[in-house]
Image: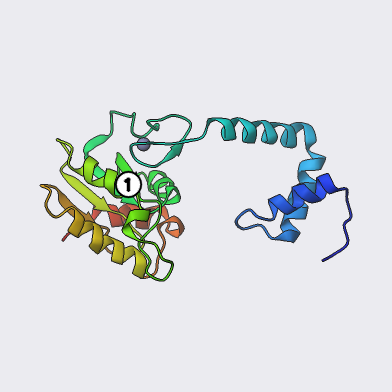
């Protein structure tokens, strides 16, 4: 471990920043120094924004999205197509789909995918509420917008079986999602095409 160049408060800031995705120790140091230099215009507003977000963040009891209101902004938006539920693994996938503008429906965040290797079983996922929501009158289609990974596809089959007794159409993303591909890394055009050309089982 390199010798500290700053007091413990600054070292702590650097260590915490280094835990962020995409930031290693080196870029965390650069980010910390940048924040310190821009104390008034960046560090202060950022720390306020983080404190406020931390106080207000809630998980939507209906869909599993994170927001500052429950139901979340998306669930509360009645201009969306209420007939369609889009099932995603994580909030990052929901954000990716919203960025693509491919669909204006409601979501259901599973909070993971089934993974025998990692010990993720059905009871660990947000599945009970999915069955309840897919059973609501007016819901006609459930789109399984899951990653094209082995675990993602295992989950697609499991959820399809789980919903098979309901009078809803279950569809999955079409071409364009490369095998092993994660939605968050796809460009908006590819995601949009994958949603529009979705296929039925
Ligand atoms: Zn919601």
In the rendered structure, the answer to whether residue 152 lies left or right of residue 9 reads left
Depth check, front residue: 23 or 198: 23
Which quadrant, please, contains the N terminus?
Answer: bottom right
The residue to which callout 1 is attached is 102
- Residue 195 seen: yes
Depth check, front residue: 9 or 97: 9
Q: Picture coordinates of residue 39 (x, y %)?
A: 79, 36
Depth check, front residue: 98 or 20: 20
- Dot 1: element: loop
**Residue at position x 66%, y 57% in the image:** 23
Depth check, front residue: 144 or 64: 64
In the rendered structure, the answer to whether residue 10 lies left or right of residue 173 reads right
**Residue at position x 69%, y 60% in the image:** 24
Q: Residues within 10 Å of mark 1 (few under 14, many from 20)?
A: some
Q: Picture coordinates of residue 87 (x, y %)?
A: 30, 50
In the rendered structure, the answer to whether residue 126 lies left or right of residue 18 reads left
**Residue at position x 34%, y 40% in the image:** 63
Which quadrant, please, contains the C terminus?
Answer: bottom left
In the rendered structure, the answer to whether residue 179 lies left or right of residue 57 reads left
- For ligand 1, the image quadrant comes to top left
């Amino acid at each position: 471990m390199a010798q500290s160049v700053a007091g413990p408060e600054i070292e702590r800031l650097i260590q915490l920043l280094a835990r962020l995705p995409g930031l290693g120790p080196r870029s965390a140091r650069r980010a910390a120094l940048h924040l310190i230099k821009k104390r008034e215009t960046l560090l202060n507003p950022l720390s306020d924004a983080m404190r406020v977000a931390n106080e207000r963040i809630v998980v939507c009891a209906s869909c599993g999205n994170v927001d500052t209101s429950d139901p979340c902004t998306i669930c509360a938006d009645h201009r969306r197509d209420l007939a369609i539920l889009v099932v995603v693994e994580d909030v990052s996938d929901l954000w990716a789909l919203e960025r693509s503008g491919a669909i204006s429906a409601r979501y259901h965040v599973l909070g993971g995918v089934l993974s025998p290797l990692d010990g993720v079983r059905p009871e660990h996922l947000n599945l009970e509420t999915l069955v309840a929501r897919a059973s609501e009158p007016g819901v006609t289609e459930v789109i399984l917008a899951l990653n094209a990974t082995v675990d993602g596809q295992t989950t697609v089959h499991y959820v399809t079986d789980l919903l098979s007794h309901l009078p809803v159409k279950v569809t999955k993303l079409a071409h364009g999602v490369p095998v092993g591909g994660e939605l968050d890394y796809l460009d908006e055009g590819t995601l949009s095409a994958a949603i529009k050309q979705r296929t039925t089982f």
